[in-house]
Image: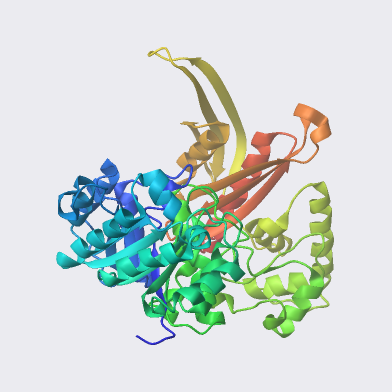
Amino acid sequence: MTDRRIYLFDTTLRDGNQTQGVDFGVPDKVAIARELDQLGIDYVEGGWPGANPTDDGFFDAPPRLPRARLTAFGMTRRGGRSAANDPGLAVTLRSKVDTICLVGKSHARHAEVALGVSREENIQMIADSIGEVVRRGKEALFDAEHFFDGYKYDAGYALECLRAAHGAGARWVVLCDTNGGALPDEVERIVGEVTSVIPGTSLGIHTHDDTGNAVANSLAAVRAGARQIQGTLNGLGERCGNANLVSIIPTLMLKMGYETGVTEEGLQRLTHVSRLLDDRLNRPSNRHAPYVGASAFAHKAGLHVSAVEKDPSFYEHIEPAKVGNVRHIVVSDQSGRANVLARFRDLGIALDAGDDKIRRLVELVKQREFEGYAYDGAEASFELLARRMLESVPEYFRLNSFRVIDERRYNAQGDLVTMSEATVKVQVGEAQAMTVAEGNGPVNALDHALRKALTPAYAELEGVRLVDYKVRILTPTAGTAAVTRVMIESADANDERWSTVGVSGNIINASYEALYDSLTYKLYREGRRC
């Protein structure tokens, strides 16, 4: 192990599962664990055996991970019991994995008040529990809970807890900022002092983000000598979350020159893994997330675009492809010819800078954004707008009419339910079709009815799905008569994504505009020419 090697410990499947609104099932845990393994994470913490049926199901048949060490979580033995006979610890020790991470108190007052044991007994609990893990031939990690607060309360005692774990054979002693209250300068100073007692090659850091400093605190600990970082994908975790490994990994590798288990090829999967997690949670990805967000390398102002065209490093701190992301030149009412020309080059459209079509397109974009459209977040709609100006987009289908009905009633079980039903009349070439579909709301019903009518002619639409739907009221003073803007993000079976926009005084009509562009864009990109 070189001094530049940092080991990555992912705790998404345990700490991340404590996020409000997050509830992984066993298939979710298996799929995420395999993605983490392919990414190059060193340790994947699967959960706490015995804590709930999901974790039990996961550890009953744990996935095989070729690279990562699958880890089970638990806590040190209780007071008054031996490590070999503690029921809670026994469940963790029996798990079908070779690595065990145990949490224990390192704050003197917490041991006395929360656990109700003496300081001496708490230290013995740590040593006995870690020793039992080692005796059974497993790799042991010790999570020193509330370490930084404990160190500030009684540094000598906190260090004794670390010595007990390390002396009993813990491969890693992990310093936890459990309530997320530490600041980077404190972390760097304290970790530096700890390295005089525990070698940095056995020290880890586990931070929470309650002050917004979890990533900075993790990097500060590395600078001070720690060689393991614990965190979660996308910063999941209870309260304000944990240290975000998706930000930490490229910073370590591309900015600080450290080695990790993630290769250059693995790093190019980072954006994919981040967004895959959001997909499994059925929630939109953070467009502004560092490194992996859809807007992380987006350029809107014409002056910026001109500079990026000359040298991307003026406004991009890394090459987007290194983390699997892409550059976006967005078009809006702030755009000039530079933005439009750059987008055209990305789309493979060759036009001379002096072509009058560019001037007319810029004017059209500004006029439509004045009406409420927003093309900086709907690049698929912009591409269609541009190509239609060049007369190159076929009319794949024509919607002759649609009708949406919402019915609120009591069902046979006496439950109050609301049902949406959509009827569409669509013309595809010379053929006409009328379809009816139900959905979870009027837009979902309309989407289902459209797809039902179109997929017999266009099989490419079979795998298209809506992954995000946003509505914004553009004229709030108009009350229920307000003009609305609908933004839709769609994805296909290959997880290619695109965004479209619609604007109307009728929310269903605005939704249809965005749906129409979404389906048209997919067919055009697939090369269909009617």
Of residues 115 and 314, the one drawn nearer to the viewer in this rendering: 115
Measuring from the top left, give residue 512's x and y in whole percent: 62, 41
- Report whether residue 525 is seen: yes
Of residues 515 and 236, the one drawn nearer to the viewer in this rendering: 236
Q: Is residue 514 above or below residue 95?
A: above
Q: Is residue 323 above or below residue 213?
A: below
Measuring from the top left, give residue 243's x and y in whole percent: 50, 62
Q: Is residue 114 above or below residue 259?
A: above
Measuring from the top left, give residue 256's x and y in whole percent: 54, 82
Of residues 266 and 451, the one drawn nearer to the viewer in this rendering: 266
Of residues 276 and 338, the one drawn nearer to the viewer in this rendering: 276
Determine which quarter of the picture holds residue 362: bottom right
- Report whether residue 23 is seen: no
User: Residue 75 vs residue 509: left or right?
Assistant: left
On-image quarter of the N terminus? bottom left
Name the residue located 78 percent from the left edge and 78 percent from the top edge: 306
Name the residue located 84 percent from the left edge and 61 percent from the top edge: 363
Name the residue located 67 percent from the left edge and 56 percent from the top edge: 377
Measuring from the top left, give residue 357's x and y in whole percent: 80, 68
